[in-house]
């Protein structure tokens, strides 16, 4: 699966860094330091839903790029709009090009949508892209980030994202369960200032250190360049052959760790990582080294963004930063987990392996 890190171009990282923070008390914070509110807490009353359905409203989905993640978000938004009687009149893909996203907004505005759902390509420069929509009175709701300078409640309805700290925490719990709550753990973290991985990694580490006294992180390695993942994994496994488990910051480099363990004939060490990935999941269901994959509920991000945007049309206010739940996907839960995260069936290779 293409995760959020691999989706975001290098030029955008600085903008994301400048707008996200990591809460010292162990909670995800929003682009402007907002406290997270569970997405499930935002509900519409039957009367509000009736008003929305009677309003004959329309929506446009203006995406930064289509990927596994975006497809799941898009699917959730489409389904919720359909349930609420909101017609989706346009869907665009900017291909990570801010200029193209600007053109996309202009194009969809010609269709006079009531709502625009979007994920800005570059939050730092996105204001002028969405300003025409504001002036036209369109309700804006965003995924993951918002244009710099925009004020929630005035310029946009809400931001919907995933609970990054919770994902890392669940990875820690999954590791503990895989190891019987005791043992030596290797910790491969993303050695760069990037809000997605930093919050997830730190949550894993603090969970192990604070909640599991019989587990110890005995080896740590920072990974600045994913291309060096195999080299880092080889060094860690060679120097620490007695590791019971290894945490890897996201799924693609975890495959390098998996390859290293196989090459060393190591059938003992378990791997826990983040985001769904077909090769890693296939190893997991076959009883290999991968013990768990922690994923966000991407589909529900779309559902929540659509629901909040539609609600705003009938006067329903949303909290500034709504976050969806995450889930630890294991060998026993892979089918349900894949469906819950992406709203799609597991790949055929995995379905065949678990028959």
Image (tube, rainbow, N blue to C red):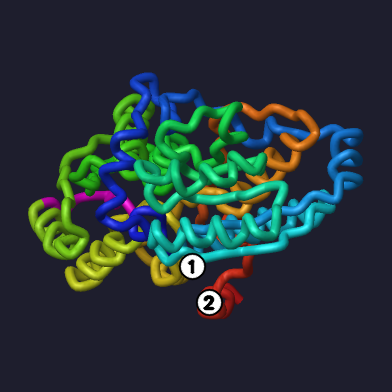
Q: Which residue is found at the position 32% from the left and 30% from the top?
A: 206
Q: Which residues are magenta?
A: 240-250
Position of 244 with respect to 161 (left or right) is left
Residue marked by disc 2: 353
In the image, is residue 89 above or below residue 147?
below
Residue closer to the observer: 338 or 158 = 158
In the image, is residue 263 above or below residue 3?
below
| Residue 149 can be seen, yes or no | yes
Residue marked by disc 1: 285
| Residue 332 can be seen, yes or no | no
Residue closer to the observer: 167 or 44 = 44
Q: Secondary structure at mark 2?
A: helix
Q: Secondary structure at mark 1?
A: helix
Q: Position of residue 184 (x, y in %)?
A: 24, 42
Quarter of the view holding residue 256: bottom left
Upstream in sequence: badge 2 or badge 1: 1
Quarter of the view holding residue 233: bottom left
Decide whether residue 66 is among the magenta residues: no
Q: Position of residue 196 (x, y in %)?
A: 36, 43
Decide whether residue 247 is among the magenta residues: yes
Q: Which residue is found at the position 39% from the left and 43% from the top?
A: 123
Q: Which residue is found at the position 27% from the left and 51% from the top?
A: 246
Q: Are marks 2 and 1 in contact (CB under 8 Å)?
A: yes
């Amino acid at each position: 699966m293409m995760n959020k890190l691999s989706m975001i171009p290098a030029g955008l990282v600085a903008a994301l860094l400048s707008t996200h923070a990591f809460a010292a008390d162990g909670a995800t914070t929003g682009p402007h330091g907002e406290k997270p509110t569970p997405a499930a807490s935002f509900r519409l009353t039957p009367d509000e839903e009736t008003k929305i359905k009677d309003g004959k409203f329309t929506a446009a989905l203006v995406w930064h790029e289509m990927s596994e993640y975006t497809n799941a978000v898009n699917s959730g938004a489409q389904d919720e709009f359909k349930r609420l009687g909101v017609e989706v009149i346009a869907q665009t893909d900017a291909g990570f090009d801010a200029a193209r996203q600007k053109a996309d907004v202009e194009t969809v505005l010609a269709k006079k949508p009531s709502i625009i759902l979007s994920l800005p390509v570059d939050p730092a420069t996105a204001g002028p892209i969405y300003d025409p929509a504001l002036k036209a009175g369109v309700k804006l709701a965003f995924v993951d980030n918002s244009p710099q300078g925009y004020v929630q409640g005035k310029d946009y309805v809400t931001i919907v994202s995933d609970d990054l700290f919770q994902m890392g925490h669940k990875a820690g719990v999954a590791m503990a369960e895989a190891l019987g709550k005791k043992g030596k753990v290797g910790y491969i973290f993303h050695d760069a200032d990037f809000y997605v991985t930093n919050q997830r990694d730190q949550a894993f580490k603090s969970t192990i250190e604070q909640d599991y006294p019989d587990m110890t992180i005995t080896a740590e390695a920072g990974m600045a360049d994913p291309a060096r993942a195999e080299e880092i994994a080889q060094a860690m496994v060679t120097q620490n052959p007695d590791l019971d488990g290894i945490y890897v910051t996201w799924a693609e480099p975890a495959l390098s760790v998996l390859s290293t363990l196989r090459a060393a004939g190591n059938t003992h060490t378990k791997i826990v990582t983040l985001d769904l990935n077909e090769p890693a999941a296939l190893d997991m269901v076959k009883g290999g080294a991968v013990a768990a994959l922690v994923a966000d509920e991407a589909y529900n991000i779309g559902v929540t963004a659509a629901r909040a945007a539609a609600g705003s049309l009938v006067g329903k206010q949303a909290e500034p930063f709504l976050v969806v739940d995450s889930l630890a996907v294991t060998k026993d839960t892979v089918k349900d987990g894949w469906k819950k995260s992406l709203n799609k069936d597991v790949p055929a290779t995995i379905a065949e392996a678990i028959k």
